[in-house]
Image (cartoon, rainbow, N blue to C red):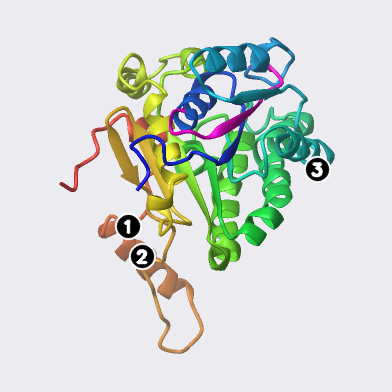
Amino acid sequence: MAEPHQDLVGRVAVVTGGARGIGLAVARALGARGARLVLADAGLDPAGRPEHPDAASEAVATLTHEGMDAAPFAEALGTTEAAERLVAFATEHMGPVDILINNAAILQDRMVWNLTPAAWDDVLAVNLSTAFYLLRAVAGGMRARRFGRVVNIVSSAGLIGNVGQANYGAAKGGLVALSRVAALDLARYGVTVNAIAPFAHTRITDLIVPHHPAVADYLATVRGVAPPDSVGTLAAYLATEAAQVYTGQVFGVRGGEVFLFSAPRPVGVQRSPAGRLTDRDLAAAFARWEERGLLTPLETDLEYMSRPLPSDE
């Protein structure tokens, strides 16, 4: 049996957006378990503009000083060619990729009527398409070796929704769907694909303005309370042999809490006796679902996640 925290020795992990925040916390957690690391980070600011081109190299220097084996990849991702170059770089410098953490993301928030096609395309390219390109690039090798771990960092904005985040929410919601389908495609080959919706204090949460009491409550649940380390702990655990049976799931983590999101399933059904729906059938169904509290409230993810979640212990 592997020694505690050394159960990923011999594994190679690629972490996108790995130089700062959640990505660095995940990389550090994987490296602490013995994984060899490739940190892919072009040093962009939260909106996707060039900001710190040496971010990956500096993060690698820090992890190397901590005794981990890591290499930087500073090329911007967003095309299938860049994804293939990243995988080739990782294979050449560290070995075949066993673990892929799709964490890189940008924000370009606008109300839907002000959202430009360019802002839509930019966010989907980084937050969704890049994850697909990388997953496609590593899937063949993982299938052949009959081992692979993919963790996609999603967001409650793609599960519950948030004001002004049509592009971000659509990308993260699409990443949830990609995770589920890829898990189904790869299950027979010993490859797992899961998603994590993180709640952590990062430079992104520092940009949120507490313009509503619920938002202030949400920020109070992460700032100083939920560092990114717990996200790293969960992601690293999902990369181990012990997590082999868990795939196609959406987990959440916030400080000392880990939780499991439900998957969309029908919660109410109305059948027409005549076999053809009428307005009366629809009105009856909607009224019954409303009375039973089955309709989803129109609230943001920040509002929902500002409330304590009941423990199932």
Q: What residue is disc 1 on?
A: 294
Give the x, y percent position of residue 176. Answer: 54, 49
Instruction: Tell me whether the residue at label 1 lies in contact with that at label 3, contact meaning CB atoms closer than 8 angstroms.
Output: no
Q: What residue type is labelled 3?
A: Thr
Q: Which mark is residue 35?
A: none
> Label 2: few (<14), some or many (≥20) within 10 Å?
few
Q: Which of marks 3 and 2 is in front?
A: 3
Picture layout, residue 196 above or below residue 60: below
Q: In which quarter of the image is residue 224?
A: top left
The residue closer to the viewer here, 26 or 225, is 26
List x then y, in percent, for residue 268: 36, 68
Quadrant of res 18: top right
Side of 152 where 280 appears, left or right: left
Viewer-side residue, 84 vs 165: 84
Q: What element carries label 3?
A: helix
What's the magenta region?
Answer: 32-45
